[in-house]
Amino acid sequence: MEAPFTDPWQRFKAALRERITGEDAEAWLTNLRLDSIQPDKVVVGGLPNTYLKNRVIAHFLPVFQELLPLYFDVLPKNGTFGLECRLAAGKQTIPPPTQNNTGGGEVDPPTGKYTFDHFKAGPASRVALDLARKVAEEPGMAYNPLFIVGGEGLGKTHLLQAIAGQIQAAHPEWKVIYKKSETFANEILEAIQTRKMKPVREFYRQADALLLDDVEFLRVTAKTQDELIHTLDDLIANKKQLVFSAGLYPKEMASLKETLKARFEMGLMTELGDPDLATRVDILKHKAALDGMTLPEEGFGLLAERIDSTPRQLEGALVRLEAYGSMMNQPITLDFIREVAAPYFTKPGGDNQNRLSADAILAGACDLLGVSMKALQGRSRTARIAEARKITMYLLKELGGLSFSDIGRMMGHRTHSTVIHAVSQWQKAMVGNTAVHNQTTRLKKQILQGGAK
């Protein structure tokens, strides 16, 4: 039987997590704290910025009013209490341009969650990370504007806030504005409707750095797009830094004017790609260390192999493991990971009955590669043996579905992290080198045809 949280607040947060999206959970729920609770009002803190503080009130107040009374008897069961949200300590907030808008520009300080040191970039995202660092170090001088393209959950928001945080820390007197594009568009629309465009226009055109996140969600009228174009032109002319992010390239945004697309494209565009196996392990270990979680070493490899997806999915799996482990008062074992993290798995496990035996794969690899088992299991670092060792590890994982630790034991008692690195390296080589890809495909076919089950 599951043991409940001893802390009602943690029990509430676990229930709340089941009611909100992964993006919101990552953005504000993890660090949400309870500051005070009275029959007529609940005060929560730890919100990273004004945008998210307003989002909680606007979108999740009914959920708070429904769930909180289940865990705190002091609150009325009908949910007739108010909710006050407070920023985390140390947030730097720029005053909003109007009294009734949805929030001003805000920046996480460089010691917060969204820093460059906390961004684990694999080969597919290394260039984007390096360019973002360069922009943060020399704002207005290099790659202006910088346009970062990437799928959901790959770290666009992380990089933009890291840039903003570093610029603000290096230039505390500067006006650094980070905005979700939807918030920006709402402010412009409201200013147009209320005929208070002048203060909004001045607010943005006085920025030293303007960072707009998810620009594909601008959803703005032609007049609003014109206003943004003029603002961008003014900032570029004054060598102010512009950074944009989107899940699409500008040319793919059908709702935007060609003139605005051209402004987005006039600087440098860079991409965030899916993390490779080794990077996924690094992300998991880094996140677990930050949260004080204890996992078996093989657990990181298991999660990285089975969740062939975004950093957000990996972190979501860890959050689920932590929550269920606490509720059930159970340590996080390999079996526990297989069961509890299963909803996040994007790849099947290695228990397919049609897998080849390890002996068949090893025998086939030795025969086809012209190396002995002793050489594969030994410590020789010659290029020929090292390459044969990597491809054999890859084949054991791909054709046999073995765990990294089992492969390590078969290959001369090597550590599971060594195997992860070798398999990841071979996967990358297959992507970047046609000859390697063809060689591997041929070997797999020959082993499958000749291997004994």
Image (tube, rainbow, N blue to C red):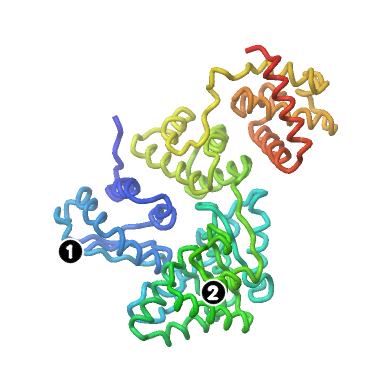
Report if the CB atoms under discs 2 and 1 are less than 8 Å apart. no
Pick the residue in front: 173 or 446: 446
Above or below, 12 against 342 in this view is below
SS for dot 1? loop
Q: Amino acid at mark 2?
A: Leu
Gap in angstroms between the C-alphas marked 2 and 1: 39 Å
| Residue sitting at x 36%, y 65% | 53
Residue underneath mark 1: 40
Above or below, 187 against 81 in this view is below
Residue underneath mark 2: 210
SS for dot 2? strand
Q: Quadrant of residue 131?
A: bottom right
Q: Quadrant of residue 442?
A: top right
Pick the residue in front: 226 or 199: 226
Mark 2 surroundings within 10 Å by alpha-carbon count, few (fewer than 14), some (14 through 19), many (20 or more):
many
Q: Amino acid at mark 1?
A: Asp
Q: Is residue 47 left or right of residue 144?
A: left
Across and down, in percent, residue 97 comes to 41, 81
Q: Quadrant of residue 55?
A: bottom left
Q: Is residue 136 something that shows in the picture?
A: no
Above or below, 258 against 398 in this view is below
